[in-house]
Image: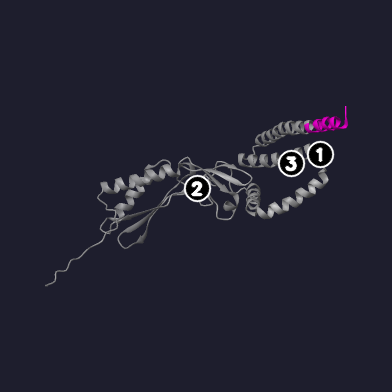
């Protein structure tokens, strides 16, 4: 057997071992990530945090496996780490946006302005939080669309968490005609709120005249409900208010324009 054959066999063995490290390492990493997620779920950690932490652990461990495989082939990992560091700096400068998203993802996980399942408005979108990833957060809109928002867009603006509190206040403005009986209108609005069982007794609701507008007398109608009942009660109140005011001949003004014609001689 000549030297070339020995060299080929040697390199073949090294490459085979490196491939084995990659394949087995990938399986082991998957198992470790799975165990990490299960442990976090067992401790009742938020699902969004579990997903984010799992992604971080997977990336770090795969880098370790890759370096181990390259070391087996004979590549100097010491110099490789230095090269990776220099390359990382260059890539970091080129991918500042991605790094910003990553840093924002870390802030979201640490500060926890929202959790999985919360209904939020952030980054110009509104929906339920499905998952927080390394670079982005996934929302599901009320009409069942999936929206993926870069994490930097979320932390770079205002975040409204509609699920943070157990109760919410419904704010309605109801305008009635100046010719209407104001006391009767107030009593009707009060009776509508009292008849709805999902409206909370504490805090008490508010029905009051808020403004004498150009063409209407405006009432503010402000009941408190459980957050889960917000939209159902909102829609029902809008319908019942219109029906009850119509039944009592209380007009709801709408924008209109009076046109006057003046006849002049030719």
Viewer-proximal residue, 183 or 260?
Answer: 260
Q: Position of residue 242 (x, y in %)?
A: 31, 47
- Callout count: 3
Where does label 3 land, which residue?
63
Q: Secondary structure at mark 2?
A: strand
Disc 3 from disc 2: Cα separation: 36 Å
Name the front one of labels 1 and 2: 1
- Residue shown at 78%/30% (left/top)? 16
Viewer-proximal residue, 96 or 156?
Answer: 96
Disc 3 from disc 1: Cα separation: 12 Å
Binning the other alpha carbons within 10 Å of mark 1 as few (below 14), some (14 to 19) or many (20 upward) gives: some
Binning the other alpha carbons within 10 Å of mark 2 as few (below 14), some (14 to 19) or many (20 upward) gives: some
Sequence-wise, which precedes: disc 3 or disc 2?
3
- Which SS type dominates the magenta stretch? helix
Where does label 2 land, which residue?
126
Side (left or right) of 235 relative to 85: left
Q: Position of residue 208 (x, y in %)?
A: 38, 56
Sequence-wise, which precedes: disc 3 or disc 1?
3
Q: Which mark is residue 207?
A: none
Viewer-proximal residue, 40 or 185?
Answer: 40
| Image quarter in which the C terminus is found | bottom left
Magenta segment range?
A: 1-15
Instruction: Find the residue positioned furthest to the right.
Output: 2
| Image quarter in which the N terminus is found | top right
Where does label 1 land, which residue?
71
């Amino acid at each position: 057997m000549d030297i070339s054959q020995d060299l080929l066999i040697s390199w073949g063995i090294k490459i085979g071992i490196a491939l084995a490290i990659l394949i087995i390492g990938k399986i082991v990493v998957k198992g470790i990530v799975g165990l990490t997620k299960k442990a976090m779920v067992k401790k009742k950690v938020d699902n969004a945090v579990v997903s984010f932490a799992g992604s971080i652990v997977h990336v770090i461990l795969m880098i370790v496996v890759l370096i181990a495989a390259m070391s087996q082939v004979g590549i100097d990992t010491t110099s490789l780490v230095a090269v990776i560091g220099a390359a990382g700096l260059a890539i970091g400068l080129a991918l500042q946006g991605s790094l910003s998203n990553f840093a924002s993802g870390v802030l979201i996980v640490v500060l926890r302005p929202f959790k999985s399942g919360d209904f939020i408005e952030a980054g110009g979108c509104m929906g339920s939080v499905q998952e927080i990833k390394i670079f982005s957060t996934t929302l599901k809109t009320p009409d069942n669309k999936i929206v993926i928002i870069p994490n930097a867009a979320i932390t770079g603006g205002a975040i409204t968490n509609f699920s943070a509190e157990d109760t919410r206040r419904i704010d309605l403005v109801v305008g009635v005609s100046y010719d209407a009986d104001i006391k009767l209108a107030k009593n009707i609005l009060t009776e509508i709120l009292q008849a709805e069982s999902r409206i909370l007794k504490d805090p008490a609701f508010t029905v009051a005249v808020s403004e004498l507008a150009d063409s209407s007398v405006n009432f503010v109608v402000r009941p408190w409900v459980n957050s889960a009942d917000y939209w159902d009660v909102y829609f029902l109140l809008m319908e019942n208010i219109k029906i009850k005011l119509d039944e009592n001949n209380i007009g709801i003004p709408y924008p209109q324009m009076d046109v006057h014609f003046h006849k002049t001689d030719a």
